[in-house]
């Protein structure tokens, strides 16, 4: 029996439940001027950011050594950074109940742990005590700044459309491989796109047909902004390189028609025994 795996852009399956709400987390890396950065962030908060009254950004900067072999800490140092992260989180839960841990950022020898809080007073004292008692010798700094618009979360931590597309494809290709898929083998891949008007949908359908796609249907759907959906398909492999190629092309094409590319689905093709 074929296993169907569907990817919708901007959906991320790495989640856990805390404090009676589902938290969705994901990680991405990006090339910077002096190496590579790594960002781990809570994705679901983008739907409600900025959150009223959580006006202060509280963050801790922890230093680590960069080597020629890696932009990031490895081995015991990485494990210790994770222990520090967990200890800061536990401390924040006890001294700043009304807080949101939104993510971390590692780059060029520094790791930053970011929180939005209602009241930042006295938190620094507790973090200083934590480092004195448990992590003496670690180089760190504590910062507080006003950020009622959640600018750091929205415009710095949260990925742009290109990175979100990469993350979606990366996670789905990993799912396929974990299911035993032979990702280099071409198979039918079905795609979805939605538009505000019938004319824009038809223009898009004509354009993808010129790219050797076949139209499966055009129909009206329950979507206030994009009520006209087109489904189309073509054979492709599902390597990360190839999925990035066809999704980037379709995203850009849908944008040209003022529409939205909604993702793709396929079935698992098992490797030959």
Image (cartoon, helix red, strand yellow):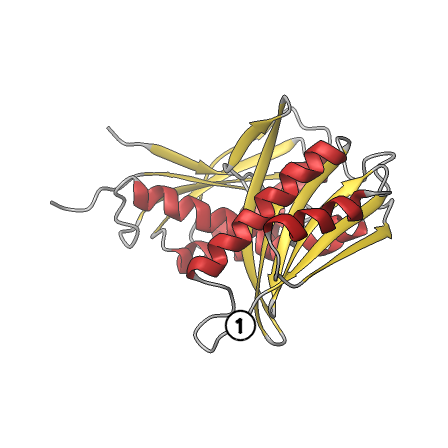
Q: x, y (%) of residue 29?
A: 54, 60
Q: Position of residue 99 (x, y in %)?
A: 75, 36
**Residue sitting at x 60%, y 33%:** 23
The answer to which quarter of the image holds residue 239 is: bottom left
Is label 1 in a helix, a strand or a loop? loop
Q: Which residue is mark 1?
A: 66
User: Along the line of sight, which residue is nearer the eye, 182 or 136?
Assistant: 136
Q: Examine the image and state in which quarter residue 101 appears.
A: top right
Considering every residue shown, the one lying at the far top of the view is 20
| Residue 152 appears in view | yes
Residue at 70% x, 38% y is: 92
As drawn, the residue found furthest toward the left would be 273
Q: Residue at x 80, y 51 (%)?
A: 151
Please state if 152 lies on the left or on the right of 159 as rendered.
right
Q: Is residue 227 above or below residue 55?
A: above
The image position of residue 86, as x and y in percent, is 58, 43
- Other-residue count near label 1 (Cα within 10 Å), few / some / many at <14 / 14–19 / ≥20: some
From the image, which quarter does the N terminus lie in? top left
Of residues 242 and 114, which is closer to you in this image? Answer: 114
Q: Position of residue 202 (x, y in %)?
A: 60, 42
Question: In this view of the protein, can residue 196 be seen by the observer?
Answer: no
In front here: 64 or 261?
Answer: 64
The single residue placed furthest to the front in the displayed view is 133
Question: Vertical placement of 267 versus 243: above or below?
Answer: above
> Residue sitting at 42 percent across and 53 percent down?
212
Relative placement, left or right, of 29 versus 49 is left
- How many numbered tags mark residues here? 1
Residue situated in front as seen by the camera: 183 or 212: 183
């Amino acid at each position: 029996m074929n296993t169907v795996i569907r990817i919708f852009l901007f959906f991320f399956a790495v989640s856990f439940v805390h404090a009676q709400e589902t938290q969705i987390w994901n990680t991405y890396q990006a090339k910077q001027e002096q190496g590579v950065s790594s960002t781990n962030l809570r994705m679901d908060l983008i739907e409600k950011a900025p959150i009223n009254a959580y006006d202060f950004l509280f963050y801790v900067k922890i230093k680590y050594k960069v080597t020629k072999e890696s932009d990031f800490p490895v081995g015991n140092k990485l494990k210790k950074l994770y222990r520090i992260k967990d200890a800061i989180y536990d401390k924040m839960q006890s001294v700043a109940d009304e807080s949101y841990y939104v993510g971390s950022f590692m780059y060029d020898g520094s790791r930053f742990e970011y929180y939005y809080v209602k009241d930042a007073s006295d938190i620094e004292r507790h973090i200083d005590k934590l480092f004195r008692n448990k992590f003496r010798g670690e180089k760190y700094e504590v910062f507080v700044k006003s950020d009622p618009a959640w600018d750091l979360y929205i415009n710095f931590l949260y990925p742009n459309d290109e990175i979100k597309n990469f993350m979606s494809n990366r996670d789905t290709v990993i799912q396929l491989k974990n299911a035993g898929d032979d990702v280099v083998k071409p198979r039918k891949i079905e795609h979805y796109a939605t538009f505000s008007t019938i004319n824009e949908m038809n223009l898009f359908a004509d354009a993808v047909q010129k790219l050797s796609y076949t139209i499966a249907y055009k129909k009206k759907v329950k979507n206030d902004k994009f009520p006209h959906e087109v489904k189309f398909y073509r054979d492709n492999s599902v390597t990360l390189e190839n999925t990035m190629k066809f999704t980037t092309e379709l995203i850009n094409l849908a944008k040209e028609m003022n529409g939205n590319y909604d993702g793709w689905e396929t079935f698992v093709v098992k490797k030959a025994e």
